[in-house]
Image (tube, rainbow, N blue to C red):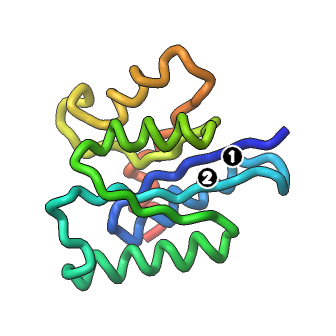
Amino acid sequence: MTQKVMVCVTEQKTCERLIKEGLNIVNNEDSEIFVIHVATKDLKVLEDNKAAEALEYLFDKSKGYGASVTVLKSNNIRETLVKFAVDNQIDYVVMGETRQQDEKDSVIFKLKNDFLYTNTKIKVVPLKNINQEA
């Protein structure tokens, strides 16, 4: 059975752990991995050398793993992720753990509600994994 996994990344090299987690989920060669980054319209990521370098690093890694890479521009990250997931019939969404103090303010919490009555599952990779890999 083909599985479709959407891995949500920011402009941080540590997001490679999320891509690897996406690879762990797929169960056969027919599975697809989509690495997606949503840039807000006011964020000029390409003018920020560090962010641009990190995204280029992640995209190179993604291609090496056979994943497709998408950068979308939107001020509504949650809505954009939901639309992409629905349009591409995503089975799993992989995201890094939120740094928000109140989980209810996080995109993850809101996405869980968006996908509550669907077959799409959300896998949250804990922040502690960053320290273990460093």
Quadrant position of the C terminus in the picture = bottom left
Q: How many marks?
A: 2
Element at badge 2? helix
Give the left or right position of residue 45, taking residue 11 as reference.
left
Quadrant position of the N terminus in the picture = top right
How far is the residue under mark 1 from the one under mark 2?
5 Å
Q: Residue at x 45, y 46 (%)?
A: 95
Q: Residue 18 versus residue 7: which sits nearer the camera? A: 7
In the displayed structure, 4 sits above or below 17; it is: above
In the displayed structure, 71 sits above or below 112; it is: below
Residue 126: x percent and y percent?
43, 46
- 10 Å crowding of disc 1: few (<14), some (14-19), many (20+): some
Q: Quadrant of residue 3?
A: top right
Query: Residue beneath label 1, please?
Result: 25
Q: Which disc, if any, is residue 22?
A: 2
Tell me the kind of residue under disc 1. Answer: Ile
Dots 1, 2 in contact, CB < 8 A: yes
